[in-house]
Every structure is written in C-alpha cells, then in structure tokens.
Image (cartoon, rainbow, N blue to C red):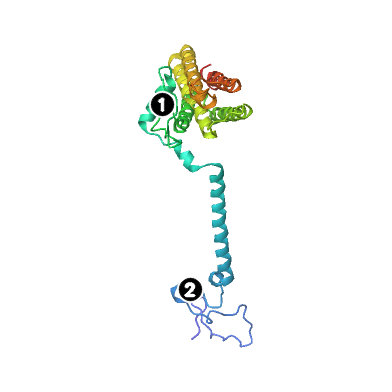
C-alpha cells in the first residue's frame, strides 16, 4: 500500500543483493585464525625470541662471555693484591675503643709518654689494639671525615658554605698528605734509610695531623681568633714532638747503645716534623679569618 503524500513513513524497497563481481576493498582474513587460548602469539607470526636461547651457538657464546668476565675479575683482584696487600691493610684497622682513646690522648699530650718503640712478636709487629705505638689508619680516616664535617659547619655558621668550597677544602687536605708521603718516600730513598717503614706507615703518621687540625678549628670556633692560635700552637708542638719521637726509632740508625746516628736521616726526621705546623696553618687559617 502506498503511503499518502506528506506522510513521515517511507516505503522500504527490496534489498538489492551485491553483485558477485563487485571487488572488495580489503581481504577478509579473520576466518583464517581463531582466537588463541592462553595469550600465545598467533600461529604464523614467528617472534624468534625463544629461538635465540635455543640456538647452540648462542649458548656457547654466552658461556664463553661468562668465562671471560670471570677471568677478568680474577685478573683485577690479582692486580689489586699485587699493589695493595689486604692483609696488611687490615692490620692498620685492627683497633678497638681503648686503643683509640689512648692514641688520641697520646696525640694531644705526647710529652709524658716514655716508651715509643713498636713491640714485635715473632718478627711481626703487634696490632694497634695491642700496642699504642703502632701506626693505624682508622684514626686518620675518621679524623679526616670529622674535619670535613667541621669545615662544613664552620662555613655554614659564617654564611660561606657552598659545595665547591667544601670540595676544595677536602681536596686540599687530602692532597697535602699525599704530597707529604711522597716527599718522605723520596727523602728516605735519597738518605738510603734501611727501614721497615712502608707507604701505609707514612700515610698513618702524616694523617695524624687531622687530629691537630680539628683541635685548631674547634678552638677558633669556640673561642674566636685567640683560641684558634692557642690551639694551633699546642697542636703543632704536640704533633712535632710526636713525629720526631715516632720516626726517630724507625729512621735513625743506632750505634748499639740506643744512641741514634746518621746525619741525613736526622735531617729527614726534623724536616718532616717542622713541616707539620705550616700544613696545619695553611689548611685551617681560612676557616677562622
């Protein structure tokens, strides 16, 4: 039945089927593969990832690489042990609380100490925890860190703190000790000193100056400029006395009755002691002035 004119309903004509020869824009591939259970990739798409580990050549390459890495690690450890003996390094850190307290008192008040000889047992020196005269690296290391923290606090109180200034102070304190150790090694070589002093021993003796530097900075921080100079003078005298009494038995040869001989060795000892006040002043004066 035809709809009257003006009606909103329109007649629907018959659906005309698509001609068989009408070309499609895209091929329908959805029927080729169905959904794959378990989230596995669709067949026909070769990821190739698992095949890498299944390849025997790749396994051989990975094994060979692991072997080379292990050999390289062994070589590095061997070279480290060649230049730095870990057992000897442990000796310088064999300390306890009692030793630290006694050694700090010795560094600040060395004048009352009588026996300065390092004791031995079966041709081996006793550890620092057994002998207060034995050198150690624990106190220099902790004193260096304490000095850097004290420098940071002092610069902060003076409104001068910056990472660059703190880094310069830390680098200067470390470099001066290294220069002093190298100068002592050169002086001992030129003076032909036959001694059991090693690099770690000299580093320990030179590193004890950080204790005096802390004392000087604390004196200036608490009592001002006058307190700084008093503390600096005390720390310098104590450090010089400690250096001479500690090194003279290891550097200066004796005549069999305990009297030291050797003019060149004596000069090396005195120069090493006289150098301490200048370093203390150079590394601490800018924190007070």
Dot 1 corresponds to which residue? 103
Residue located at (57% from left, 52% from top)? 75
Residue 97 point in image, percent of width and height: 36, 31
Query: Horizontally, is 235 left or right of 48 in the view?
Result: left
Residue 148 point in image, percent of width and height: 49, 28
Please, which residue is most extreme toward the top here? 226
Residue 235 point in image, percent of width and height: 47, 18
The vertical placement of 34 against 121, above or below, is below
Residue located at (54% from left, 53% from top)? 74
The vertical placement of 50 against 215, above or below, is below
Near-viewer residue (241 or 37): 241
Mark 1 burial class by Cα count in 10 Å: few <14, some 14-19, many 20+: many
Q: Tell me if I can see residue 33 in this picture.
A: yes
Mark sitting on residue 40:
2
Mark 2 burial class by Cα count in 10 Å: few <14, some 14-19, many 20+: few
Q: CA distance from mark 2 to mark 1?
A: 71 Å
Mark sitting on residue 200:
none
Q: Tell me if I can see residue 159 in this picture.
A: no
Task: Please tell me how many numbered marks the rendered image carries.
Answer: 2
Under tag 1, what secondary structure? helix
Which numbered disc flags the more N-terminal residue, 2 or 1? 2
Residue 115 point in image, percent of width and height: 42, 23
Please, which residue is most extreme toward the front here? 256
């Amino acid at each position: 039945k035809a709809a009257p004119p003006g009606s909103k309903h329109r007649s629907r004509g018959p659906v005309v089927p698509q001609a068989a020869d009408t070309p499609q824009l895209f091929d329908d591939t959805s029927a080729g593969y169905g959904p794959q259970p378990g989230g596995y990739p669709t067949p026909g798409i070769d990821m190739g990832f698992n095949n890498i580990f299944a390849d025997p050549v790749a396994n051989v390459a990975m094994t060979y690489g692991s072997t080379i890495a292990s050999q390289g690690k062994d070589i590095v450890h061997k070279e480290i042990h060649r230049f730095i003996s870990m057992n000897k390094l442990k000796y310088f850190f064999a300390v306890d609380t009692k030793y630290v307290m006694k050694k700090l008192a010795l560094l600040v008040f060395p004048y009352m100490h009588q026996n300065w000889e390092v004791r031995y047992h079966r041709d081996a020196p006793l550890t620092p925890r057994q002998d207060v005269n034995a050198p150690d690296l624990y106190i220099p290391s902790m004193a260096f860190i304490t000095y850097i923290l004290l420098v940071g606090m002092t610069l902060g109180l003076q409104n001068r703190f910056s990472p660059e200034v703190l880094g310069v102070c830390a680098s200067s304190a470390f470099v001066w000790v290294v220069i002093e150790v190298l100068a002592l090694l050169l002086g001992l070589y030129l003076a032909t000193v036959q001694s059991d002093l090693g690099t770690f021993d000299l580093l320990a003796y030179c590193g004890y100056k950080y204790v005096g530097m802390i004392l000087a900075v604390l004196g200036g921080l608490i009592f001002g400029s006058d307190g700084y100079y008093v503390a600096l003078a005390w720390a310098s005298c104590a450090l010089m006395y400690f250096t001479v009494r500690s090194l003279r038995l290891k550097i200066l040869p004796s005549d069999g009755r305990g009297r030291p001989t050797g003019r060149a060795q004596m000069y090396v000892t005195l120069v090493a002691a006289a150098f301490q006040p200048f370093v203390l002043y150079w590394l601490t004066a800018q924190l007070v002035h």
